[in-house]
Image: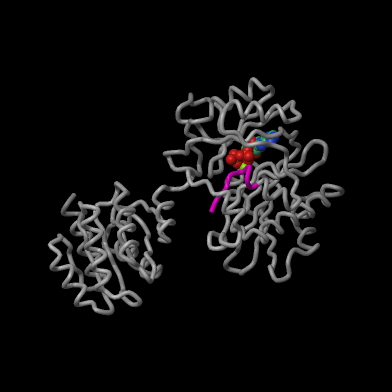
Amino acid sequence: MNIHEYQAKEVLAKFGAPVPIGFPALTVEEAVEAAGKLPGPLFVVKAQIHAGGRGKGKFKELAADAKGGVRLSKSLDEVKANAADMLGNTLVTIQTRDAGKQVNRLYVTDGADIAKEYYLSMLVDRASGRIAMVVSTEGGMDIETVAHDTPEKIQSITIDPAEGFQPHHGRAVAFALKLTGDLNKQAIAVAKSLYEAFVATDMEMLEVNPLVETTDGKLLVLDAKVSFDSNSLYRHPDIFALRDETEEDPAEVEASKYDLAYIKLDGDIGCMVNGAGLAMATMDIIKLNGAFPANFLDVGGGATKEKVTAAFKIILSDPAVKGILVNIFGGIMRCDIIADGIIAAAKEVNLSVPLVVRLEGTNVQQGKDLLANSGLPIVAADDLGDAAKKIVAQVKQAA
Ligand code: ADP
Ligand code: MG
């Protein structure tokens, strides 16, 4: 689960990370009011969307040379003009798709006098089973170029969670950032607070870019991008409350209500499968037959009729879907029950695209008979390879 920058900064501040003061705003008036509470003379109005690259982003509705989603403002009037420019408009960045994201929230924060920008991020490194702290002296909006052209300028420090954050980790971070004296001490403290926030809240990824050194010698977290491990949210109700569903894909939000694992993809063959491994194999075999899956969807081991119906509706809500492949192994659930669910769902949603069903497992013959006698144009398949061939052929024929 992702959250907004201002929320991430609130979380990090609780763990002692140095964060500039600021307030979220939903309207132009709130933005001006927020700026009024800041010391000035420089205010920064920042678009809050779940994507980075805002500074260099472009608004669809504004002139090509208009400023991006992070705007320095020298007066309350400028704050007002910038807020009015951004709210309701669509920001396209390197991290959004071409469609961009509508800006519905702003963050109005204290402007910093920047001497230098650094980079610090953290992630769970699955290869080592540890937490990697990735740092660079070359922070700021061009970190992707740094990573591409001069990867040696990015250093990684691994921390064993069993050992926790030790003083030597802090020293390694400060050394990699080439900081001395008081800034060195600050870097150690910042790294420690970020590590503690990361572990305590079950973050998956934390990116502070930039971490800045101000002209008066202070380190500040100037941007923060955080995502949490969704499987851990049940034990962090306070974090879960930060969820902004309007930033998520509506079909994925709907799927999560039914406990369906659904991820939208770019192809045109909708897939309904039980078990993540079988779902992956199904997507692979669709590709092997020259087509592309429209989604990943795991209905889970105990798929009920309600779940199957919800899954059908979600798949069909994607206008790109030209056909559906159902691939279910009836282990915990019997095939006849699944067939009942498929028939009911197909009738309820008024199925308008070809549907190929492959069933295997307990009571498979009863299941197949039910499908064959349903009066619906359902194509039965004998195995995975056969199913993929059939749905690809059906979709090509319909095109
Ligand atoms: P993004 O990464 O989405 O482009 P950032 O928050 O990193 O957004 O902002 C982009 C750039 O804007 C930063 O690298 C920094 O130079 C400048 N900036 C952001 N916040 C502030 C601030 N509070 N004071 C001064 N400059 C800022
Ligand atoms: Mg940034």
Q: What x and y, as percent, mark residue 58?
A: 50, 32
| Vertical position of residue 343 compared to residue 221: above or below | below
In front: 337, or 90?
Answer: 337
Residue 235 shows up from this direction: yes
| Vertical position of residue 19 compared to residue 363: above or below | above
Position of 362 with respect to 370 (left or right) is right
Q: Is-magenta flag for residue 26? A: no
Ligand 1 - quadrant of the structure image = top right
Q: Who's the residue at 51% across and 39% down the image? A: 93
Q: What x and y, as percent, mark residue 169?
A: 76, 61
What is the span of residues highlighted in magenta in the rendered image? 1-8
Q: Which residue lies furthest to the right in this view?
A: 181
Q: Residue furthest top?
A: 77
Q: In which quarter of the image is residue 223?
A: top right
Q: What x and y, as percent, mark residue 357?
A: 23, 66
Question: Which colour assignment does the render follow?
Answer: one colour
Q: How many labels does the image show?
A: 0
In front: 104, or 283?
Answer: 104
Q: What x and y, as percent, mark residue 246?
A: 47, 43
In front: 37, or 320?
Answer: 37
Q: Which residue lies furthest to the bottom in this view?
A: 362
Q: Who's the residue at 74% across and 27% down the image? A: 40
Residue 141 shows up from this direction: no
In front: 9, or 129?
Answer: 9
Position of 342 with respect to 105 (left or right) is left
| Vertical position of residue 366 compared to residue 16: above or below | below
